[in-house]
Image (cartoon, rainbow, N blue to C red):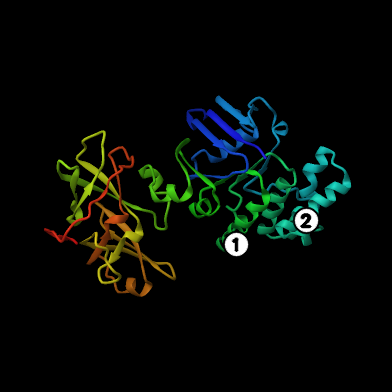
Amino acid sequence: MGQLVLRNVSVNYGSVRALQNVNLTVNDGDFLVVFGPSGAGKTTMLNVVAGVKRPQAGQVLINGQDVITWEPWQRDVAMVFENYALYPHKTVFDNIASPLIRRGVGGGTIRDKVRETAAMLGIDHLLDRSPAQISNGQKQRVAIGRAIVRDSQVLLMDEPLAHLDAKLRNEMRTEFIAMKRQIKRTVVYVTHDYREAMALADHLVVLRNGIIEQEGQPAMVYSTPASVGVAQLFGSPPRSLVTADIEALGEDGVAVIHVRPWNLKFKAWLGPRENDEEQIVVAMPSASVTLAGNGSSSANSARFRAPVALVEQQGSYAIVTVGDSHAEFQFRCQPDVADGLVLGKDIELVLDLGQVLFYDGLGQLLVGHPKQVDSTRWEGATVQ
């Protein structure tokens, strides 16, 4: 196993800044997931580590050695590609064995290691077949086996489940959870799927526009996104963002927050702020909103009314979009409840204030939280 460190790594493709001063440490034996949207720079980061791409600036250290000038084959790094990259004319056995053959490993050792790796991946019965004779999920296992059999210090995985259908992707994700305990390797796994990121990561890095916006334990990153950009990457549907006015601010730091399109008001302590802006962004996870009368309200919730804009049936649940071009949000409900909603008609909703987050005008998280309030009634809305 090995420790991987990136120091001030920057990569440009012409005028496009793919990576911007990236600093990252992956400890020996960690399963680190780099998560972000398409174009974030995830694959570029892997290519830099593997030696496929030379950065304009920065260092790549493996076990304390700067390998930035080393050729890919010198780095003792294995990579699983998004498109499998198998040899079509070779059998599954020979595909898995290919790194060992190139190293000149003895035939008996190759046979034992290939069979051991294939058994771990559940493909030992496919060793005599060609890639054309196996499924996509099996091809991905072969690609993983070829990377694992090398016993490299660092294993890189570039969107390994991206080309699988939804059912197989879910199955493979479950298998990866069990597999990562057996691999016992330093792993950097790239994905744009937040479910994969949450399920697999020991440590999670969120990469956007070539910048690491946040990193930490998956549960922490999910529950308290550091920026508006990160907040919108998680959830199905993701958190809804609405602009709200700060109408009043008491000496105790408690503000009156007003979402004007729905005339929704509530109180919140916004914590220390660098700027005295008059507007903030309120981030509402879908679970924070329920139809009035469909579920219990917490002691710290607010009622308001807004028009139904869209209803999307998803099978076991429905996603309802409420609001208009000025402000809208999404929440889940039961399919039969959604069937009774009328487009354009106002519905009464309950917002659990304990689940909302606040961001400043620059999109950065405020440390504030909604204030426990009494039964004060505001015009057009009730704070319970």
Is residue 274 visible in the rendered image? The answer is yes
- Determine crowd level at label 1: few under 14, some 14-19, many 20+ residues with C-alpha closer than 10 A: few
Judged from the image, the secondary structure of the residue bearing numbered disc 1 is helix
Residue at 26%, 33% in the rendered image: 274
Which residue is tagged 1?
A: 171
Q: Residue at x 30, y 65 (%)?
A: 290
What is the total number of numbered labels drawn onto the structure image? 2
Q: Nearer the viewer, mark 2 or mark 1?
A: 1
Of callouts 2 and 1, the N-terminal one? 2
- Identified by mark 2, the residue type is Ser
- In the picture provided, is 328 more to the left or to the right than 108? left
- 269 relative to 200 in the view: left or right: left
Task: Please name whichever residue, 283 or 309, is drawn nearer the observer in this view of the structure.
Answer: 283
Query: Is residue 170 shown above or below 50?
Result: below
Q: Quadrant of the C terminus?
A: bottom left
* Nearest the eye: 214 or 324: 214
The kind of residue tagged 1 is: Glu
Which quadrant: the N terminus? top right
Q: Which mark is residue 326?
A: none
Q: Nearer the viewer, residue 374 or 183?
A: 374
Visible residue check, residue 209: no
Query: Where, by quadrant of the figure, is residue 287 drawn?
Result: bottom left
Residue 125 lies, with reference to residue 275, above or below; the image says below
| Residue 206 percent location from the top left of the image | 47, 42
Using the image, determine if residue 49 lies above or below residue 81: above
Q: How far, Cα to Cα, is label 2 from label 1?
A: 23 Å
Q: Is residue 278 left or right of residue 328?
A: left
Query: Mark 2 highlights which residue?
Result: 130
